[in-house]
Image (cartoon, grey):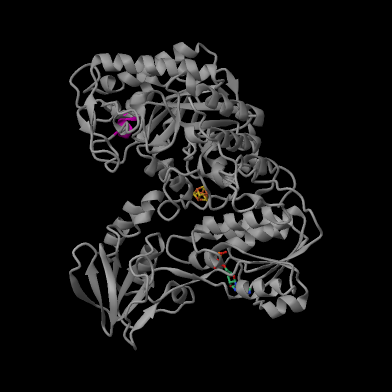
Amino acid sequence: MTDQTPAPYDILFEPVQIGPFTTKNRFYQVPHCNGMGYRDPSAQAAMRKIKAEGGWSVVCTEQVEIHPTSDIAPFIELRIWDDQDLPALRRIADAIHEGGGLAGIELAHNGMNAPNQISRETPLGPAHLPVAPDTIAPVQARAMSLQDIEDLRRWHRNAVRRSLEAGYDVVYVYGAHGYGTPHHFLSRRYNNRTDAYGGSLENRMRLLRELLEDTVDEVAGRAAVACRITVEEEIDGGITREDIEGVLRDLGELPDLWDFAMGSWEGDSVTSRFAPEGRQEEFVAGLKKLTSKPVVGVGRFTSPDAMVRQVKAGILDLIGAARPSIADPFLPNKIRDGRLNLIRECIGCNICVSGDLTMSPIRCTQNPSMGEEWRRGWHPERIRTKESDSRILVVGAGPSGLEAARALGVRGYDVVLAEAGRDLGGRVTAESKLPGLSAWGRVKEYREAALAELANVEIYRESPMTGEDIVEFGFEHVITATGATWRTDGVARFHTTAMPIAEGMQVLGPDDLFAGRLPEGKKVVVYDDDHYYLGGVVAELLEQSGYDVSIVTTGSQVSSWTNNTFEVNRIQRRLIESDIARVTDHAVVSVGVGGVRIKDVYAGLERDLDCDAVVMVTARLPREELYVDLVARRDAGEIASVRGIGDSWGPGTIAAAVWSGRRAAEEFDAVLPSNDEVPFRREVTQLA
Ligand code: ADP
Ligand code: SF4
């Protein structure tokens, strides 16, 4: 790649005027949740600071609840309920400024999306309707009176004033993603009012207009006012193109910046399995010309060419990003410096989203330092230099081995990476060939590119290693990253011992499919007791290969855990459209010749399902023989150290494997506390 900024990208480094501020470039980290919120403010501050350092001209918080009636628990976001919340918010704004960015705060009144589980206030909305998240609390929102609306305006104004006190430069009015009350008022789906706030578009956008006017008045030129708005709700009766065009015609000049979003977070953060980069373009194109103010929008943009095209085509002024900024906080600087080959492209897996949805600190498949900046001191681009002249052998070049070799290489150690196969990448290389998962390959591509720049890392392909080889070659320090194999005996969550399997019946696992082995016959049952993406993907692969496929799962939905990656609904739809039979709430209890016996998980009722073959997507077994052998050799003094990582240590997500590779590299030569101690910093609640 070139050493200089390629001229075609210069346009991305032009300044943009937002209210009283001028940005240093067009890169804009839009508000995004992170599962840290009010619980881990210092961790969040460190994370946001690194984004600013990496070149994002504006770095925003996630949604910040403005009042106890906007309480979105159990999800962990920020709060600006009163002055007690200001020190945490100030710490975040200060950190963004230290990193060289402008700080944005997304003020949110969640209205009928707020079950108020902590505050126990009655949710508020335009109409008497159940709160949107049906799994959190079986409660309804109360239709807001004119007094409630007046109260809401005052709470919002108070939050704006406090945002300025906390040092924010960009203050949001939030009416997007089905979260903000202005969204609920704008949408005919929720707003059936007959007063001045319902009916015509003018009435439905009245609350938005008032909140914008109040905010502009309160900031009085000291900050920029941004409005994040739904451009398409993608649901019957929801906000339409016509609505948003009307809003922009009437209110287009009120805020200093428009931030275009979809009608649900799920609609904005679609995984790469279900939508390409730039999916929002069709909904956003043409809106910019309705306002003279700058506009920002997202699209999982990782390609600078795609970014330039958006700007040149007059679609966006600022390139918004949540996920691409999570996967690579230094994306803007890498484009600026012409280091395009080292961009850690987001793979669109939504493991980051799963952090927020499981109320745990954010994590990222591509960027293992995400969420660890403060508590472990990890940085996406830097790592402390080596502390000895040790030479380290990493065995296995899957995601964990690649990351361990890369990070140890950056530290300056001499590293040898030995891989049994011809291809690097382990499971990501295999899985990226499955339907919809091609972007998984970026986990390998980024690391291969990074390793190519490290003269101190040698890679040996087609080099299966044994303990004997390792001792013979004189390696002293070994990291085993040998992966795991999929079981085919039915053991997973439902069965913890092997199920009866008739001799002669074809039973395959994902590893067979990865190796190109397909079953004979026509009818295949996929038994999924894993619950993440692979069961559904394997069913799709088999259907595309011409089989008649049924997927049996103990979950009440196929791939039920993908609820946390916003995929579960799209997966059901794709399976229905592909004519793949879904047999949910059932376990396979035995495999006979010509069929399986299945059992209802609630009532225990059993029945038979005919098939020619079964593909088990169940549990995995770590490939730990080498590790076990090396432990014995270490104890016998033949090698100095051995550490197992990734799926060979504990099978999990690709994100977990990458993270464990990074951890092994971070901890090599470090004086570690005993494992009786907590291995990371915590922010413990201060007693009142
Ligand atoms: P992880 O997700 O933990 O990185 P993977 O299963 O993706 O694990 O990758 C493990 C890699 O290790 C595979 O590419 C496999 O070929 C390789 N491997 C397994 N055992 C050996 C061995 N003894 N020597 C060299 N490579 C090995
Ligand atoms: Fe992208 Fe996946 Fe990282 Fe999220 S977790 S930023 S989707 S690579």
Against 379, is 394 above or below?
Answer: below
Q: Nearer the viewer, residue 150 or 4?
A: 150
Horizontal side of 67 relative to 640 (left or right) equals left
Against 558, is 153 above or below?
Answer: above
The picture places residue 145, in percent across and down from the top left corner, at: 23, 17
Q: Nearer the viewer, residue 415 or 73?
A: 73
Indicate whether residue 402 is drawn in magenta: no
Q: Nearer the viewer, residue 3 or 477?
A: 477
Q: Residue at x 46, y 38 (%)?
A: 33
Q: Residue at x 74, y 74 (%)?
A: 638
Horizontal side of 136 relative to 486 (left or right) equals left
Indicate whether residue 243 is drawn in magenta: yes
The picture places residue 56, in percent across and down from the top left corner, at: 60, 35
Q: Could you tell me if residue 519 is visible in this image?
A: no
Which region of the structure is painted magenta? 239-245
The picture places residue 264, in percent across and down from the top left corner, at: 36, 39
Q: Could you tell me if residue 557 is visible in this image?
A: yes
Q: Nearer the viewer, residue 661 or 216?
A: 661
Task: Name the chief secondary structure element in magenta.
Answer: helix
